[in-house]
Image (cartoon, rainbow, N blue to C red):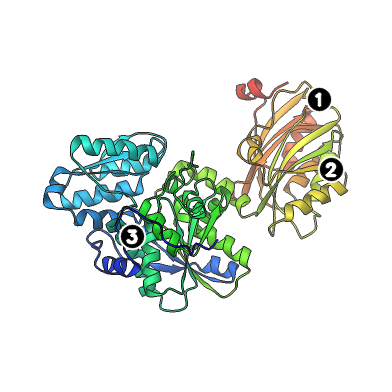
Amino acid sequence: MPAKKPPVTSPVTQFTPADYLTRILNAKVYDVAKESALEPAKNLSRRLHNKVLLKREDQQPVFSFKLRGAYNKMAHLSADQLKRGVICASAGNHAQGVALSAHKLGARAVIVMPTTTPQVKVDAVKALGGEVVLFGDSYSDAYGHSVKLEKDQGLTFVHPFDDPDVIAGQGTVAMEILRQHQGPLDAVFVAIGGGGLISGVANYIKAVRPEVKVIGVQMNDSDAMMRSVESGQRVTLPDVGLFSDGTAVKLVGEETFRVARSLVDEFVTVDTDAVCAAIKDIFVDTRSIVEPSGALAVAAIKQYVATNKTKGETYAAILCGANMNFDRLRFVAERAEVGEEREALFAVTIPEERGSFRRFCELIGTLPGGPRNVTEFNYRISDSQQAHVFVGLTTHTKGESAKITANFGKHGFATLDLTHDELAKEHVRHMVGGHSPLAQEERLLRFVFPERPGALLKFLSLMRPGWNISLFHYRNQGADYGRILVGLQVPAKDDKAFAKFLDTLGYPYVEETLNPVYRLFLKA
């Protein structure tokens, strides 16, 4: 959306882009920061048919751009202020910038962080000598507590975004981009939390190359700046999403709001799945893993290209941080395929009769558009008439899930498209199962299937007609083999035949029929 509106009043001196240009050119950042690389994202550029440049702020000493503004602010403090010490409130990246800057300048640093801050950021601040105080659930909560400590202890507050010196420090990112790339540049995409980075970037770009668009990016559940610009005044969000903790700000700054309102050309919001997909895109091109806020700009570029059907343009994305908790990668990897719509999820109802499972698997192999891999298959016998299975399939293009749903229905399998269902993606896919009185004479086995077409059909074709699959769980993990859990109803008189079946199949397996976990949660 356009944001060309008259500036609003602010208690902070209203510097012009020319004023900020002078401040940015004279900013003191390179005692601690480095000029980060501006690299082409070759794979992503090829896919989007536009040139995408990645500004690698994830490679700074604290893995974020935040040390630029923090150090520039602190380098302008008096000797007396530095002697008393500084304090800040931060979700983590600004905290590390302040802690490193304080260490460089020989000052005490008290860092107030929300209790939701990833542990990797808390540990990093402590390692740099910062005194960490955990308080509240968001930046705004931490900020309120830091103001109290500032007065009580006589410290100097280093604001993470709403300060001209901080904004000028962040503006050096744009100065480097324009110096590093001399050719055509259509837009720079910038993640927004409180607005410090985009204020610095917009001021520099509009002073030097005003034709270049500055596009702000926010999470759809943390869009305080976009709502504020739309309202013409700062809006406080009642809650913010915490997936992108680096941009989880309920209230943007007064000065950053004034700057963004007058200089930012457009605002874009992206969702969690799109950000997860962007994290994967960045990894494919750089072999680096950025945090969610670091991927917002790339997610927005993909959305912008899809919406505006652009080709041959050049975009820069600022990868603003890489402080990612390793434990979150499981969630990111799972949601990335859905976010890119490379995977579609379905709930399919099939008749509870022999051969229907095989017939459904054969149908998957003949879907229009070419072969697809099964990414997940969850099933537990529960009804004598119908079976409900949770299925994941790879897709070739966006929007295929509706066509696949219709195709399944045409062949007699009632299907519900779950691709965009948050409950299904977050919880239900892990909860299919339970005790079943129908699962008599069940044997439970864990198999390792080769990850290739036909592996499952081989399994099904070698089964005796009198045996029944009562449980099936499979999830593609990106390896060249698949781990599969199968419940088979095999009469005791068929034990020898079953042993021969396993031997003929040739897939590695472990029988889990006596496993106490199975008996506790799944056995009839």
Mark 1 nearby-residue class (10 Å; few <14, some 14–19, many ≥20):
some
Task: Calculate the distance from the C-alpha at mark 2 to the C-alpha at mark 1.
Answer: 29 Å
The earlier-in-sequence mark between 2 and 1 is 2
Secondary structure category for the residue under label 1? loop
Disc 3: which residue: 170
Q: Position of residue 297 (x, y in %)?
A: 49, 59
Task: Pick the residue in front: 127 or 197.
Answer: 197
Q: Position of residue 518 (x, y in %)?
A: 64, 25
The earlier-in-sequence mark between 3 and 1 is 3
* Horizontal side, residue 78 vs residue 65: left or right: left
In which quadrant is the C terminus drawn? top right
Which amino acid type corresponds to the residue marked 2 in the rendered image? Phe
Q: Position of residue 467 (x, y in %)?
A: 82, 32
Mark 3 nearby-residue class (10 Å; few <14, some 14–19, many ≥20):
many
* Horizontal side, residue 356 vs residue 277: left or right: right
Task: Calculate the distance from the C-alpha at mark 3 to the C-alpha at mark 1.
Answer: 71 Å
Disc 2: which residue: 413
Which amino acid type corresponds to the residue marked 3 in the rendered image? Gln
Task: Calculate the distance from the C-alpha at mark 3 to the C-alpha at mark 2.
Answer: 56 Å
Disc 1: which residue: 491
The mark closer to the camera, 2 or 1, is 2
**Residue 113 in sight:** no
Task: Pick the residue in front: 176 or 42.
Answer: 176
- As displayed, is residue 51 above or below residue 472? below
**Image quadrant assignment for residue 55:** bottom left
Secondary structure category for the residue under label 2? loop
Question: Which residue is depicted at the point 31% across and 46% down?
Answer: 95
Q: Position of residue 469 (x, y in %)?
A: 78, 33
